[in-house]
Amino acid sequence: MPLVRIDHAQDHPEGFGRAVGEIVYRAMMEEISVPADDKFQIITTHQANEINIPKSYLGIEYTQGIVFIQITLNAGRTVELKKKFYHRIANDLHAELKVRKEDVRLVMVKCSMDRRSERKFLLYCLLGAGVSIICVSKRHAYLPVFCNV
């Protein structure tokens, strides 16, 4: 169950954040095989003074039109698949919402379950207890990091 956070400045038109969310969700389904209806998104609009970015970094110029997208999901996707996914989002945001590709900042946070007991616990939470869970701590097999009952 991926969790998507979208942050942008209030300078964008009404409904902009939701439109970004739909573009991200469509790319998740089509590029990285996220199932239908697996859409959990937190969209936040910020005042201009709440977005603190450099004018440029590593030769890339940024504007106040920047969009931050953070996706937490299970590990297991190849670097090539993640690159394709990122390009799909940047291209679609540019084509549909006129966001500069340079102003798309995508961060993917991966959760990994290294031990069999963690997998069993996750399956129990998802199927047996009516609990939504994002990731299980590597240190404590039975301690949920994010849990929604």
Image (cartoon, rainbow, N blue to C red):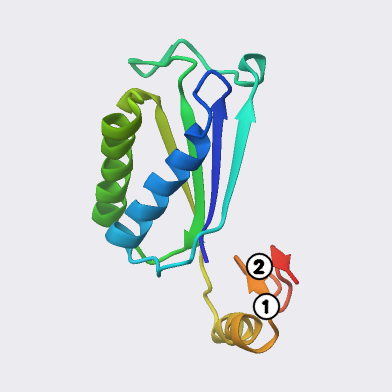
Q: Where is residue 148 in the image (x, y as percent from the top left)?
A: 72, 67
Residue at 31% from the left image edge and 27% from the top image edge: 101
Q: Where is residue 18 in the image (x, y as percent from the top left)?
A: 50, 41
The amino acid marked with disc number 2 is Ser
Whether label 2 touches label 1, CB < 8 Å: yes
Q: Is mark 1 on a helix, strand or loop?
A: loop
Please name the residue that numbered disc 1 is placed on: 141
- Please state which of residues 75 and 93 is positioned toward the viewer in this rendering: 93
- Please state which of residues 113 and 52 is positioned toward the viewer in this rendering: 52
Q: Can residue 79 be seen in this view?
A: yes
Please name the residue that numbered disc 2 is placed on: 137
The amino acid marked with disc number 1 is Ala
Residue at 68% from the left image edge and 81% from the top image edge: 130
Looking at the image, the residue that sits furthest to the front is 14
Q: Image check: 52 left or right of 30?
A: right
Mark 2 and mark 1: Cα distance apart in space: 6 Å
